Image (spheres, rainbow, N blue to C red):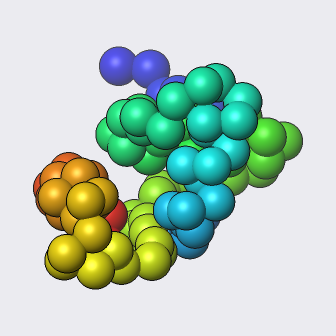
Amino acid sequence: MGISNRRQLPLATLMAFIDGGYLREQCKRKIGTDSIDYNVLKNRLESEFNTNCGGKYTGDLIRIYYYDAIVKSNDPKHQEQEERFAKIKSIDGMK
């Protein structure tokens, strides 16, 4: 068995804070929809860190905090928001 010459990069523990309203608005403006695959977003955030850190670290995204305004229960968009929150909460690491 040979010894690997690959250098072990330091692990950077990552946490992201997302303003849900702003994220959805930017998605609507830039791509025409606010339908977001949060699993893809989570993976993309970690990948972007690892790509852009200059090879100095390996990022480990341990948690994403998602903030959003709460729609009142009598608002027509309440059910839509509840479904979105349920999807987000089901993803490992999303709070």
Q: Which one is nearer the viewer's eye here, 44 or 7? A: 44
Q: Position of residue 63 (x, y in %)?
A: 40, 68
User: In the figure, 25 relative to 43: above or below?
Assistant: below
* Quadrant of the drawing holding the C terminus: bottom left
On the question of residue 57 being in view, the answer is yes
Asked whether, in this view, residue 61 is left or right of residue 52, the answer is left
Residue that appears at 44% across and 46% down:
42
- Residue at position x 72%, y 30% in the image: 30
Q: Is residue 82 above or below residue 36?
A: below
Closer to the camera, 4 or 28?
28
Quadrant of image for the N terminus: top left
Q: How far across and how far down the image is residue 41, in percent?
A: 47, 40
Q: Is residue 8 visible?
A: no
Residue sitting at the far top:
1
Q: Quick one: 81 or 13, which is closer to the camera?
A: 81
In depth, the one of 54 and 92 nearer the eye is 92
Farthest residue in the right direction? 54
Quarter of the image where one finds residue 19: bottom right
Q: How many marks?
A: 0
- For residue 71, which quarter of the picture? bottom left
Please indicate whether residue 68 sits to the left or right of residue 24 in the image.
Answer: left
> Picture coordinates of residue 15 (x, y %)?
52, 69
Tell me which residue sits at (55%, 49%) in the image.
Answer: 24
Residue at 64%, 60% (x, y): give it.
22
